[in-house]
Amino acid sequence: MRLRIAENFEAFFYAPLYALQALRLAESQALIIDWLPPGGPGGAIDAVRAGSVDLTWGGPMRVLRDRDTTPHDGASLVCFGEVAGRDPFALLAGPQLLADDSQPFDLRRLTERRVSVVSEVPTPWFCLQQDLRDLGVDPNQMLANQQVLSGLSMSQQMDALQSGSVDVIQLFEPHISSLERQGLAKVLVQASTRGPCCYTTFITSRDGLSRHRPALAALERALALAQQWIATASDEALARLIAPRFPAVPLDMLCNAVSRYRLAGVWSDTPTVSRTGIDRLRNSLLAGGFVSRAASFDDIVVSI
């Protein structure tokens, strides 16, 4: 059995997939994988639909959008094999805003701040908008008041926070640990605290599923083995395993990032896609206008 997998953009919260690769767990399931180099976020989706690659990984929001905007046919996207079941992003502020950190930060206080949100991918901001709505805050009013900046990369956000041009930024690891280590920022809220919100799965097409079901089942078994390995490995063991992916990041910072995501439950324990997590994601995208109709769980998630 053989699969061509187009890697998504490189990101620390994809660590279980990097572990799967480094531990050669696909080979243990008699599966050969041609790993195609990472591109931009969601860059392989068109190739998956066209069948020039067999699958990729990424946010189920791509599948929800596909179901919303394209005909339902053999090229339609489906997802399986949950990798990240909670949101890996966090809101950070400079230490000057956190003099009194004895109480948990109330998201409603964002209405008093200038907030920069992730530009590389849309999901973090759509999910944060829903968190705000749940608390009675209208994110559209924040946009109208020009309190939300959405055009900066994560590196640019870090610079903007240090320059004082924004008060709060939205990042994932290892950027979070980097700023904390330098004493330049502290975490206000980890988005994982909202609960299940399906963030990363494998993505293939319906035609791809028909052609490669045994191979995809082997891949899902390999993912389960990676998840089992992570569950028993130390933070340092996982950090060392994936360190070649992040040569510029010190090992102790990688260990800190592993610990944060492990404690937050960002990485899923099994490949089973969470219905609750999909529901939360879908409702956030629907309320934010990213999709216009609510595709059902069973329409986008397949059992292998």
Image (spheres, rainbow, N blue to C red):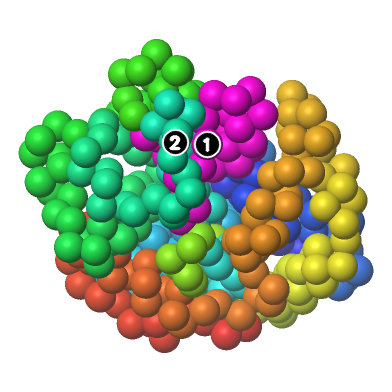
What is the secondary structure assignment of the residue under circle 1?
A: strand
Q: Can residue 199 be seen from the camera position used here?
A: no
Does the residue at mark 2 contact the one at mark 1 (Cβ under 8 Å)? yes
> For mark 1, does the 10 Å Cα neighbourhood hold few (<14), some (14 to 19), or many (20 or more) residues?
many
Q: Nearer the viewer, residue 218 or 112?
A: 112
- Label number found at residue 128: none
Residue bounds of the magenta highlight: 168-191
Q: Nearer the viewer, residue 9 or 55?
A: 9
Q: Residue at x 57, y 85 (%)?
A: 303
269 up-or-down from 116: above or below:
below
x, y percent for residue 153: 42, 28
127 up-or-down from 78: above or below:
above
Q: Which residue is mark 2?
A: 98
> Can residue 79 be found in the magenta stretch?
no
Q: Amino acid at mark 1?
A: Lys
Q: Which residue is mark 1?
A: 186
Q: Residue at x 78, y 44 (%)?
A: 255
> For mark 2, does the 10 Å Cα neighbourhood hold few (<14), some (14 to 19), or many (20 or more) residues?
some
